[in-house]
Image: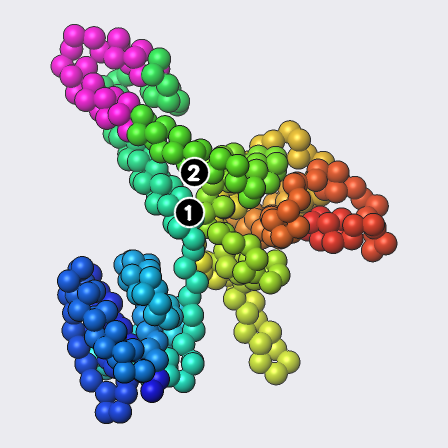
Amino acid sequence: MNINIGVDLHKTQFTVYYRSGTGYYREYATNEQGYRSFLMNINRLREIGDTVRVGVESTGNTRYFKNYLEREGIEVKVINTLKFKVINESVKKTDRHDASTIAEFLEKDMLPEARLCSEKSEEMRRLLKVRRTLVRTIVTVKNQIHSLLTGLGMEDVRGSLQSKRGRQAVLDALHRTARGLVVQPLFDIINRLQEDVKHIEKELEKLTAGDRVVELLLTIPGCGPITAWTIRASTDDITRFSEHKRYAAYAGLAPWVQCSNMTAHYGRITKRGPEELRTALVQLVMGMNRSRMTKDYRVMIQYKAMKKNKGSGKSIIATARKLSKIIWFMLTDNKPFNSDLMVNKNLNDKADDMRTAIKISA
């Protein structure tokens, strides 16, 4: 007998519905003991010849739950919650009802699956997320110091707190005063946080040593290590995107579209998918714009021309979408960025390497 199990997973407990015959519910604690009890019940079913499948929504602890069961040879399907609106928009929102709904759709093979990224990409995302939090905290502390210095009537030069030398100059100006005692602890926080940021960046360097994707991304003018790491972690495996349009849509850079009969309406970008990837592509546009190497690139010439008519925001997003196309072809073909193709104005369909020459030119 095929038994389909729906799981509504939470932080402290998970509700399970065993869809077989009349069906029945069970509740387990979200800890080692609860996982073992759930696994024991599944093994009892397998011992009598039943085939078991499990469906679970994508949450913060889904990866551990999935790995725990798959180590025992149990098939687990992770649900894409954005595409599975049956639960989100249900008027009857209970754990038992959600679990039974998952089991029902699992039985009919109608669950939209979500793909979990690799362990390496997951570790990179964690490190980048912590680094982002630390950097934001540093910026917050610096803003507080700028406010204090302005209130004390001191000249507050932009960038004066960026280096240890600049911060030391501020302390020297406030030497042996109560004002110095106010600013000193904030400087100590900045120094400590910056050391933590450097430590995380070293760990990311070790984690991505010899990574081909990062090496390819770093060949793009204006792309630094942080941008390359972010794109690498958010993209994970480029082969899961059959075309560059799907990759742009995954990054949330594709516009909303509504077509009916002879009418088509296009709106703003969807902003779905990893915000970090979308931000990294925008930062890449700004990095290329600052680079002197890119002044003759057609993509940057188009960006500057569009900026005059459409404004900065729309121009950056449109260029970011073009760069996502370039990155897709680079990673798919395993080829570095080719600057010659970006300035060559005589490209045609008869080029020897049309895939690279025509499509990578965006």
Residue 201 vs residue 345, the one in the foreground? 201
Of the numbered discs 1 and 2, the one sitting upstream in the chain is: 1
Quadrant position of the N terminus in the picture: bottom left
The label shown at residue 166 is none
Span of residues in magenta: 166-193
Identify residue for label 1: 120
> Callout 2: helix, strand or loop?
helix
13 vs 236: above or below: below
Q: Residue at x 38, y 74 (%)?
A: 84
The reply to whether callout 1 and callout 2 are in contact (CB within 8 Å) is yes
Residue 96: name its quadrant. bottom left
The label shown at residue 207 is 2
Cα gap from disc 1 to disc 2, whole angstroms: 8 Å
Query: In the rendered view, does 83 fall on the left or right side of 238?
Result: left
Residue 257, position in %: x, y?
A: 55, 69
Residue 358 vs residue 76, the one in the foreground? 76
Task: State whether the magenta stretch is mostly helix, strand or loop.
Answer: helix
- Tell which residue pokes out farthest to the bottom in this image: 22
> Callout 1: helix, strand or loop?
helix
- Tell which residue pokes out farthest to the right in this image: 350
Residue 186 vs residue 144, the one in the foreground? 186
Query: In the rendered view, does 283 fall on the left or right side of 61?
Result: right
Categorize mark 1 by other alpha carbons within 10 Å: few (<14), some (14-19), many (20+): few
Which residue type carries mark 1? Lys
